[in-house]
Image (spheres, helix red, strand yellow):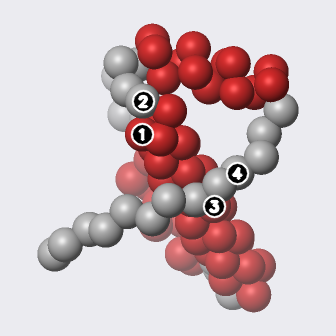
Amino acid sequence: MIHTMQTIQIVIDDKLLKAADQAAKQAKMNRSALVREALRHYLKQLHSREQERRDRQGYERHPNTEPELAVWEEVAAWPED
């Protein structure tokens, strides 16, 4: 698989630019690499939040029943001494 890079232009304030440049220097990467990594991280978080939202909706539409929960309570119980 061939990855191609596109050049983009973004507008950010001076304070954020300075912080990004410091973070890039500390991480020993260039500004573009830092922005790519930050964007990947952000998109991964968005994906996780969307999955959690769908799971929550599914459980709200189809909540567990008492018998289903009872099975897991036995497994999760602390052993007796």
Residue 63 x %, y %: 70, 79
Q: Seen in the image, is 5 located left or right of residue 42?
A: left
Q: Nearer the viewer, mark 3 or mark 1?
A: 1
Residue 66 x %, y %: 65, 74
Upstream in the sequence, badge 4 or badge 1? 4
Marker disc for residue 33: 1
| Badge 3 vs badge 1, beta-carbon distance below 8 Å | no
Q: Secondary structure at mark 2?
A: loop
Spatial separation of the CA atoms under disc 3 and disc 1: 20 Å
Residue type at tag 4: Ile
Residue type at tag 3: Leu
Figure check: 26 above or below 59: above
Identify the residue at horizontal 75%, vertical 27% (top origin): 16
Q: Secondary structure at mark 1?
A: helix
| Badge 4 vs badge 2, beta-carbon distance below 8 Å | no
Q: Which residue is mark 2?
A: 30
Q: Seen in the image, is 61 located left or right of residue 4?
A: right
Identify the residue at horizontal 40%, vertical 19% (top origin): 27
Q: Which residue is mark 4?
A: 10
Q: Nearer the viewer, mark 4 or mark 1?
A: 4
Residue type at tag 2: Asn
Upstream in the sequence, badge 2 or badge 3? 2
Q: Seen in the image, is 39 located left or right of residue 3?
A: right
Q: Secondary structure at mark 3?
A: helix
